[in-house]
Image (spheres, coloured by chain):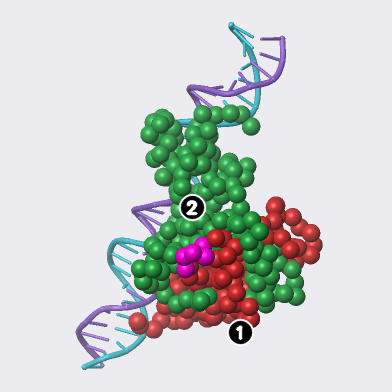
Chain colours: A green, B red, C purple, D cyan
Amino acid sequence: MRHSKQRELVRKILKAAGTHPTAEQVYEEARKVMPEIGIATVYRNLKTLVELGEAGVVRTDDQADHFDGRTEKHAHLLCDSCGRIMDLELRRGGELERLRDDVQKAFGVEDAEVEVRTAVFHGRCPDCLRNGRTSGETFVTH
Amino acid sequence: MRHSKQRELVRKILKAAGTHPTAEQVYEEARKVMPEIGIATVYRNLKTLVELGEAGVVRTDDQADHFDGRTEKHAHLLCDSCGRIMDLELRRGGELERLRDDVQKAFGVEDAEVEVRTAVFHGRCPDCLRNGRTSGETFVTH
DNA sequence: ATATTAATGATAACGATTATCAATTGCGTA
DNA sequence: TACGCAATTGATAATCGTTATCATTAATAT
């Protein structure tokens, strides 16, 4: 794979972003620094980065894919109230081992092994929960 | 809301399907019984059913939305190897209570409450796991 | 039966993404 | 260092899933 300024820029923007921008948002950011960059190049490089494992994709309820520059394993929570995509970081030595077992036990697939690579939870983020913003019925209550 | 043959048919097809068909697939099924039905009507009614809470939507890695006629709470597992969407049923009196806690503990949001309504897990289904079909690195291993 | 108006079906429009293709550029080699 | 070639780019056409438009049809209240 040949080096290109454009791909480097897209990579940098994605890594620097604390959010989960769409291709369009990465494009807007990229033009500020490289006005001649084309949107096709942005799409192309985002796709490449995902294939290289240097970026992830999060699909939400809006039509556009959101990209994620964090390569460390983590999960996401999509907030039904504010639409925010929240990172759920993996903690070393945490309760992680139990999660997969619980998924199996909770959903009745104990008889067959299941591998869980990542997860997207749908619910409400701490902010919205605190502020009492509603989002329908609760799946897993406390 | 006024009754319509078309909406009834879409509802019936979705309920009867054991799978998670796309709008196109529901359309194909519907034409067999009602050849004059239009695809816009199918899209329209699928959307309506989702709004009525009579159907769910699952977004996978392919571009099209998949619809789900099951209204009971459940989660999904998207198999990275075969692309299958697997239902993860909720079991009464199971380990469900622990799941949310474990999500919080595993991902370090214990300090703030999080509400989890549903979840989409990405990984490998029992079939692919048994047959040794690969799907990249494992997130939660056993 | 009739009037009202929601729902339909055909199709145009739309938004996100991908394909095409000529021009450009990175980079190994002479 | 200059050359040559293939990867990459930017502009834009094409595609795909979905929604909007609108004249026609049909469900239901009177």
Q: Position of residue B41 (x, y in %)?
A: 43, 70
**Residue B118, above or below A28:** below
Report the magenta residues as a range.
B109-113
Confirm whether circles 1 and 2 share one chain. Answer: no
- Residue at horizontal 47%, vertical 62%? A78
What chain letter is assigned to the residue under label 1?
A: B
Task: Give the number of the disc on residue B92.
Answer: 1
> Which secondary structure lies at badge 1?
loop
Single out the mark in the foreground, 1 or 2.
1
Name the residue nearer the viewer: B65 or A69.
A69
Q: Tag 2, which secondary structure?
A: strand
Closer-to-camera residue (A76/D2): A76
What is the x, y in percent for residue B115? 48, 70
Residue in the foreground of this view, choosing between D9 and D12: D9
Could you tell me if residue A45 is visible in this image?
yes
Badge 1: few (under 14), some or many (20 or more) residues near its Cα, within 10 Å?
A: few
State which quadrant residue C6 falls in: bottom left
Label tally: 2
Q: Amino acid at mark 2?
A: Asp
Q: Which mark is residue B39?
A: none
- Residue B72 x, y percent position in the rendering: 54, 80
Q: Please report the residue visible at 59 percent of the width from the left and 43 percent of the height from the top.
A: A54
- Residue tagged by mark 2? A65
State yes or no: residue A124 in magenta: no
**Tag 2: Cα neighbours inside 10 Å, few (<14), some, or many (≥20)?**
some
Q: Residue at x 56, y 71 (%)?
A: B100
Q: Nearer the viewer, residue A136 or B26?
A: A136
Quote the CA–CA distance across marks 1 and 2: 35 Å
